[in-house]
Image (cartoon, rainbow, N blue to C red):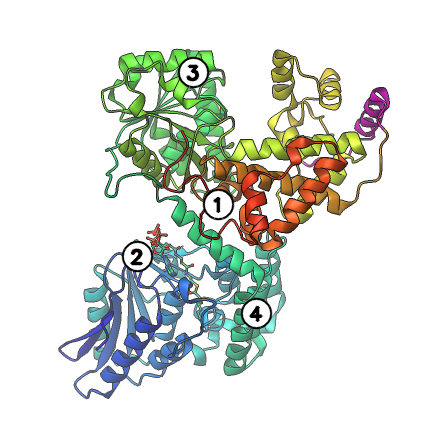
Amino acid sequence: MSEVVRLERHDGIAIVTVDSPPVNALGAAVRRGILECAQTAVADPAVKAIVLACAGRTFIAGADITEFGKPTQPPALAEVVAALENSPKPTVAAIHGTALGGGLEVALGCHFRVAVKDARLGLPEVKLGLLPGAGGTQRLPRAVGPELAVKMIVGGEPVGATEALKQGLIDAIVEGPASGGEAFACRVLAERRPLRRLRDDDSRLMAAKANRSIFTDAVAAVTKRARGLEAPFAAAEAVGLSLDTPFDEALKQERELFLKLMNGDQSKAQRYAFFAEREAARVAGVPEGTKPRKVERVAIIGAGTMGGGIAMSFANAGIPVTLIEMGDESLKRGLGVMRKNFEATAARGGIAADEPARRMGLVTGVVGLEHVKDADLVIEAVFETMAVKKEVFATLDKFARSGAVLASNTSYLNINEIASVTKRPQDVLGMHFFSPANVMKLCEIVRGAKTAPDVLVTAVAVARRIAKVPVVVGVCDGFVGNRMLAARSRQADKLLFEGALPRQVDAVATRFGMPMGPFAMDDLAGLDIGWRSRRDRGVKSEIADALCEAGRFGQKTGKGYYKYEGGSRAPLPDPDVETLIVDACARLGLRRREIGDNEILERLVYPTVNEGARILEEGIAARPGDIDVVWLYGYGWPIYRGGPMYYADQVGLRHIADRLSYYAEATNDPSLEPAPLLKRLAAEGRTFASPAAGRKSTQTLAT
Ligand code: 3H9
């Protein structure tokens, strides 16, 4: 028998167990093992029923993604699924953990499915730019109806066991997976239940067959947010086949659609992003086996927008937090905003009606920094100035217990300087959340010069516990994300002086796939912040200053680079702004010119990549993938373009270096000169992803 799949017999029941850590993915050996065990069990007269279960932390989590794009090895997954479905003896899938993708497809091939109560079942292939390619698009609609099937397949979100039972996706909830599966198989035999082969059961399709709009409405609802992505539309098309195409023909077409996506650029980028995200959680330059410190009690300092959002993230994950403010009023205001946000989510149906109260119950608001004394982790989210941060950390040093991790949520400031006011710089680091912190998944973990390895590992583990995507970065102005963003903003601003308008620049960015353009983003963040900071530094920016002088601070005042009407967040082009821009140029004696969309795109993206190259060479980020993860989860870079560094590799570094040199000269802007690393890789015909020779270090991070 196979090493990764074993067959045991308990009184007439064959138990086929997949044991292929970490997630029992369906690599060739697992597929072969399941097929051989099933065939052996079918041929064995002593076996009356077959249970498929998994060892370890989860049921099968899907096809083995690492095999995609390589020559396929038999047996195909569809063959394995068909063998289970065609078995003359009852087959039962016994599910724990997550039955995902090909894993759920295997389970759908079984005649019955049982699951433990915290199991989750789903077909998340769209998140990898794919669709279920082993019959999932045909069997799931037959199990749960095409409306829910299209929601699960196009949305990619798994459902829990209770919901799965209600919808007919599973037949029972059991205590232990293998034992529950075995007991269920005995019941099937005792009751002589007919075998339910989903391929032959069209009963759940009837309503939508008679009234197609049931299905098309469901498709319209789930594809609404799929702008730019190919997989959701192909997946909806495949599910639609279940309504009017014979099963075998539909499987053939599903396969063709699957292969087209798998070989396409979007899925390649999305699969790259999947692994980059997991790689980012492995901290470079930390001794093997470094254990995180225990974190049970968390304190957050500052109940403003950021502090409140961070506290909500902990409450969302079921972790109690103490929220500390300096005065009753600000505390009350902060708690009120959090409650309102939770209630708004519940009103939209995002969480159950009793969740806001339960989650607020996990947040204890208090006044006074002395309340940090029991916390294992303290996250400071106060005003973004060095003097205030230093004062807070000096006080924390007095009150926090020894060994507590002290984190600052600064988005720009030097962590080493903040740490220097404490007697324990080894315990200090940055945890930079992105706004709104309860929604955005990125957390830059900023490693200071003296941050201890176990403190870093602790911050990464905590971030993952609260469903954030952590990326470890070094100390510099703006870290990875905001430093690259600043390079982009500089070009966006310059484009306005040269002849472009905000709506043109933003349209290019959104057509590329960004959720919003640089100017709509500035309006969201508030223009007054930059204005104040420019005034403090004695710097002028003719257009942005003129907007602020006219009281246009962005969304909060209903006017900025755009106007906002009726409380809507939709940016509307404003002729006044366009006049203001043209006037500013005239005052400065600048001749405006027609600027093409291609130039705008290149001048937004290539300088971002160029700054990424500097960041990589300086060791501020350990890997190009880490930079990509920052942009995917912090700024909404389109997942189907993989991230800026991945995108640059696809475009070709030589082309990017050439264009940057051209723009540096044409616009008289030395900041656009290609970074040394970019120049070198381009000259050598290499990519950022190619082995790291020439980079300062991939093992250690600049601090
Ligand atoms: C599919 O099924 C297509 C079919 O329809 C058709 C085929 C014809 N393959 O996330 P974690 C690795 S497409 C290979 O940190 P967690 C992962 O890289 C697939 N490797 O753990 C990591 O490795 P490392 C549809 C995989 O507990 C380790 O496992 N399925 C796969 O936070 C642990 O992962 C999916 O899209 C895989 N399929 O989360 C599910 N999955 O330790 C994708 C994981 O070296 N997977 N690895 O870094 C997940 O969503 C999460 O991994 C899961 C566990 C929820 C399962």
Cβ of mark 2 under 8 A from ligand 1: yes
Residue type at tag 2: Gly
Mark earlier in primary sequence (1, 3) = 3
Q: Which mark is residue 97?
A: 2
Q: Residues within 10 Å of mark 3 (few under 14, many from 20)?
A: many
Q: Position of residue 191 (x, y in %)?
A: 24, 78
Residue type at tag 3: Lys
Point out the stretch of residues depicted in magenta. Answer: 570-590
Foreground label between 2 and 3: 3
Distance from Cα at disc 1 to Cα at disc 3: 31 Å
Q: Is residue 572 magenta?
A: yes
Q: Which residue is mark 3?
A: 389
In the rendered image, which quarter contains the C terminus? top left
Mark earlier in primary sequence (4, 1) = 4
Distance from Cα at disc 4 to Cα at disc 2: 30 Å
Give the residue at x 23% y 33%: 294
Q: Which residue is mark 4?
A: 260
| Along the viewing direction, whichever of 669 and 254 lies nearer the viewer | 669
Secondary structure mostly taken by the magenta-highlighted segment of the chain: helix
- Relative placement, left or right, of 229 versus 572 is left
